[in-house]
Image (cartoon, helix red, strand yellow):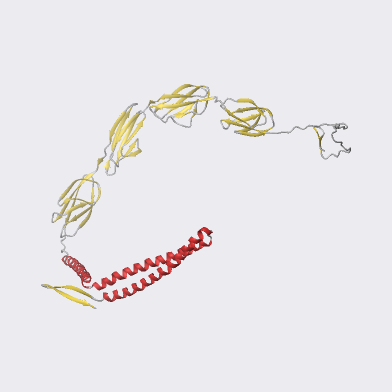
Amino acid sequence: MTIKHPQLGLLRDYLYPIPIEKATVYELVLSTGKVVTTVEDEVIGQWLVINPEPAEAMVYINDKLVKTGSYQAKLKPGKYNYRVEAPMYHSEVGIVEIANARKELNVKLKPAFGLVSVSTEPEKDAKVLIDGKLQPNVTPCQSEPLSAGDHIIQVLKELCEPVNQKVTVVEGQTVPVSLTMVPNFAELDISLPENATLFINNEQKATGNWKGRFSAGVYSLEARLDKYKPAKQDIDLAVGDNKSIALTPTPIEGSLDVIAVPSGATICVNGKEYGTTPYTFDKLLIGEYSVQLTKTGYATVNKSVTIEEGKNTELKETLTRVAAPKVEKEKKEQTVTNENKEQKETKTVQTVLKVYNPIYYKYKKSKTLWLISALVTGAAGTFAYLQAGTVYKQYQTATTNDAADLYSKVKLFDMVSPVAFGLAGFSAIEFILKSGKQSKAKKQSVSFNPIPLKNGGGLILAYHF
């Protein structure tokens, strides 16, 4: 028998020493000496998960920092004190009881701060200082987290008056602040020639037109351009002015007279055509110029002249006559005539071959047909041969149901491939024979060759065999 006792334990296969009578009730009494009972509780741990918001919040269990961020741990059953805290947030505390199931807490801390949204009009991109601390962004922007209470907002921008404003920050809210910037500048729009360079107070600013802002005061403006006298002007600007000004440098010029003997020569200056001699250039910028004179029947003249400020320069040249290139012209015309003649003769011979040699074209057509036949039947034979091998491999691994069908296809391809190869061979032989006959027929032709004569022309009839 097996005997079980809640304190004494388990006794298996106990042999009762006295015979047991049937239909008899027995009482079993266990007697022992001094019994010492030790009871050990079974410890079963369960998971505690705490998900804080913000994610970088610190988690405390029983006043001990256990994790920064999400906390996961297996704890013994019982009650635990927890606390979640983060800078600029209100802490949250509580008691959590671990029993027989997993426990998960999502703790969202309430902000102990507010935000300020700063914008400026009409100017943007102003620097923002809050309580004297420069913020990382320019307007429009949102501040860093601020503790609840009063703060001083200051915005700064070059050429504008500083603006200060007191604002009260409320926990969990974004307070909008719009500030008006007061301009402390004048605007000036300066027009220049395209390649002119602008200098302001002898400092280079730009090339071409320019627009900018200035603080109140007197400024010296200058436009410089090569081969021009600078345009200079002083201007007095006050806050709020919006002025436009044009600076035009004065060209430094001279004049040029161009004369050729005989007259009527075409004039090109720096590659640009201007007219014929005699010719006067009243206003030319100072500097070096390349002058070319051309006239039919005369040698071209190339000269370089220098134009000086306020002076007249004269260029006078006598042109040299040259002979016209008649020989070259006649040679060129003769070459063109001969080329046209050869083209006409070639066209005549080709036409004659088509008309008077039909046997040649008959074998040419027949040869082409046999070549196509050889290629097609050869391709068909190759395809059948390859397919026979492929289907035979499938037949070797096929099931009983598919084997018969695959075997029939193998037989069909095996029958088609030799027939196709035979036809291809026959076609190839015919192709070779027809090629030989075509070559022989090609030697037999009739041609007409026209021959130019002094006062007419002749014709040669030739038969080749």
Q: Quadrant of the N terminus?
A: top right
Q: Nearer the viewer, residue 315 or 194?
A: 194
Q: Quadrant of the C terminus?
A: bottom left
Relative placement, left or right, of 187 versus 252 is: right
Relative placement, left or right, of 89 versus 462 is: right
Q: Whole-percent x and y of residue 441?
A: 26, 75
Q: Quadrant of residue 176?
A: top left
Relative placement, left or right, of 215 versus 169 is: left
Q: Whole-percent x and y of residue 260?
A: 15, 55
Looking at the image, residue 385 lies above or below residue 68:
below
Q: Nearer the viewer, residue 361 or 182?
A: 361
Q: Whole-percent x and y of residue 286?
A: 24, 46
Q: Whole-percent x and y of residue 77?
A: 69, 30
Tell me what residue is drawn at x 14 percent, y 54 percent.
Answer: 264
Q: Nearer the viewer, residue 266 or 24?
A: 24
Looking at the image, residue 177 lies above or below residue 450:
above
Which residue reaches farthest left?
Answer: 455
Number of numbered markers? 0
Tell me what residue is drawn at x 21 percent, y 54 percent.
Answer: 292
Q: Quadrant of residue 329?
A: bottom left
